[in-house]
Image: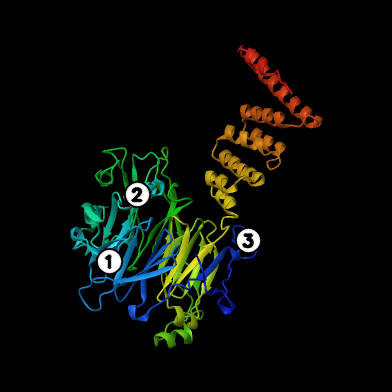
Amino acid sequence: PFRYAHKIMQDSRQGSHDSDNGSEGDCRVDAFNIDFLSEWKHDPEKGNHVTGAAANNLLFAGTDQGWLIRYSLMEDKLWSVQCPHTSPNEGIYKIFVDPTGNHIIICTTGGSCFYMYNETSKFVQLKKLQFVWIESVAWNKLAAQAWCNATGKAKKKAAGNTMSFLIGSRDGEIFEVVFEDQKERQCTRVWRIKDSLDQSREFIVITDQDIAIRGLLMEPYTDDTRIFVACCTTSRLYYFVGGPTVSDVFQAKSQAETGTHAKGFHELPSRVSESELHFTFTEYPLGQPNGLVWITEPGLFQGRVSLSDTSKTPFTSNGLIEYPHFSGLEGAKSGKARRLLLSQEIKTDSAKKLPCSVAMSKFHAIMLFDDRLYCLHTLSQRISYSMVFTGEDVHKYGWFCKAATDYLKGTHWLFTNKAVFEVSVEDEGQDAWLLLAKSKRFDEAFANAGDNKKRIDEITAYKANHLFEVGEYSKAAELYAKVPHLANPTATAIKLCQIKQQTVLRKYLRLILDSCPNTNFIQITSIVTWLIQMYLDKLSRSRSKRLDTMSIVCTLRIHK
C-alpha cells in the first residue's frame, strides 16, 4: 500500500554516519531510510500540522486551524474533519490514538476534549472530563491483545472496548477511564501529584509546568496480578506497582503496608515546558517492555524495566544519554536560511538543544529537533544516522513537530508542519548482542544472537567472566568449560588455583576432560594426571584427619 514520490535523502541532504568507521556497536548507514509520503496532501487552508499519531496502519495529524486529518495506508485514503471549537482561532493541541487505531482522543488549545470512534466522524465531548486539560494517555495493552486475538463478531465487540486506561492532566491528576460502545462509561480520579509532594516543598509556588503529567505509561506484569505505571512531569518520573485492578495501583500508601506495592520517583533539574515518556519493546503486544526513555533537560533519561513474575525491582535507572551537540552554522535553524525564514537573528555557537519529540525503535532513539533528525543507538550511545533540513526543505515541508510509532505494525513516522515521512529501520541490532553482553544483559544478548554459535559462545564467555567477578565460581566454571576455544583451559585453571577454589577446579577439569576429543591424548593425559594428584592429595589429608574416604575413592573412577 505504500507509494512514495521520492526519497529526500539526496545530495546535500544525504544522511550521515557520525561514528567512526568500523567502531564497535555502530549501525550501518543503510539501516535507516527516510521516505516522503506523497499521498499525504497538505491543504494550507486547513492549517499546519502541530501534532501527530500512528496506529495500526492509520496516520493522524492535528492542525493549528482545528482540523483532524486521517490517512489509511491500507486503503490509500485521506480524510479530514474539523473539530468543534469555541473560538475562531482554536486549534488542536494534542491527539491520542490507541494501538488498534479504533479510539481517538482530541484536545484543543482551548482546553476542550473530544472522543471519536474510528469508524465514525462524530466528535463526542467528554463530559466527565469537561474541565480537565489532557496532557497524556496510557492505553491498556490488554485491550489491544483482546482485539488482535478476536475474530468475527467478537472482534467488533473488542474494538469498541478500551478496558481501563489512564489519562494524565495539566493539573497533575491521573484518571481511570473506560470507553465502551463509543460511550464514556467510567471516569474516576485515582491519583493527584500534589498529594505526593515533599513536606519541605509545600510552601514553594507550584505551577502547571511543575505538576502537569507530560507522559504516562501502563503495563501489566506477566502474571497479570500486578500493573506497572510510570508518569512524568518535566522534572520528576514517578512509578507505581500494584493490582490486580488499575485503581489498586495507587492505593498503597507505602511499601511497608503491602508488599505487592512499590512507589518511588526520580528527580532531575529541568526548566523545559514539555516532555515525553516512552516504553521500548522487542515485540508488541505480546512482548513485555524492556526499558523506557524520558526527555529531560540534562539529557535523555534511560531506565530498565523488568516485569517478569520473579523480578524484584520493576524499574532501575540506566542514567542519562547526552543530547547531540551541533553547530549553529548547519541546517535551516541557523545562518542565512534561518533569517530568511523567520526574519530574526540567532546565535551560531555550538550548542546543545533539546529534542521536540522522540520515537523508540528496538535499539535507537529517533530524536527530532526543529530542522534535523538524529538516530541515537541507546546501547553504544553513538549517533548511527543524522539528517539536516536545508532552508529549501523547511520551506517545502515545514519544521519537524512530532515523532510517532505504530506499535502493532512496528513502523515509525515523522510529522512536519506540512508533510509526513516514514523512518524505515532494518537490521539495526546487528551488533546489539555484543553490546548487551558487555552491559551484562545476557538473556537479551542470547535472544539477539539467534542461532549464530560464534555469537552464543562469545556471550557465554562474557557471562562466565561476570560470574567469576561476582564470586559465582562454580557457575563460571561450567560456562568456561563450554567455550575452551575462547577461555584458555590452562589460564582458567591457573585462575581457579590462585583463588584456592580446589573443588571448583576439580569440577572444571572434569568438564574439560568430558569435552576433550578422544584423539587428544596429550591433553587427556595431562588432565587425568592433574586430577589424580588432586584426589590423592585430598585422600591423604582426609586420612590424616580420619575422615570417610569412600566418597573420594568412588570419585577416582574416571571413565573416558
- The amino acid sitting under disc 1 is Cys
- The amino acid sitting under disc 2 is Ala
Q: Residue at x 38, y 79 (%)?
A: 43
Q: Which mark is residue 23?
A: 3
Front one among 79 and 453: 79
Q: What SS does tag 3 mark?
A: loop
Q: Which residue is mark 2?
A: 143
Q: Residue at x 36, y 60 (%)?
A: 268
Percent of width and height locating residue 350: 49, 76
Across the whole image, how many numbered discs are drawn on residues? 3
Q: Please identify the quarter of the rendering in which residue 266 is found.
A: bottom left
Left or right of 503 in this view: 412: left
Q: Which residue is mark 1?
A: 107
The answer to whether residue 234 is seen in the rendering is no
Measured along the vertical axis of the image, is residue 512 above or below residue 546?
A: below
Q: Which of the two discs, 2 and 3, labels the residue nearer the N terminus?
A: 3
Q: Please identify the quarter of the rendering in which residue 510 is found.
A: top right
Front one among 192 and 524: 192
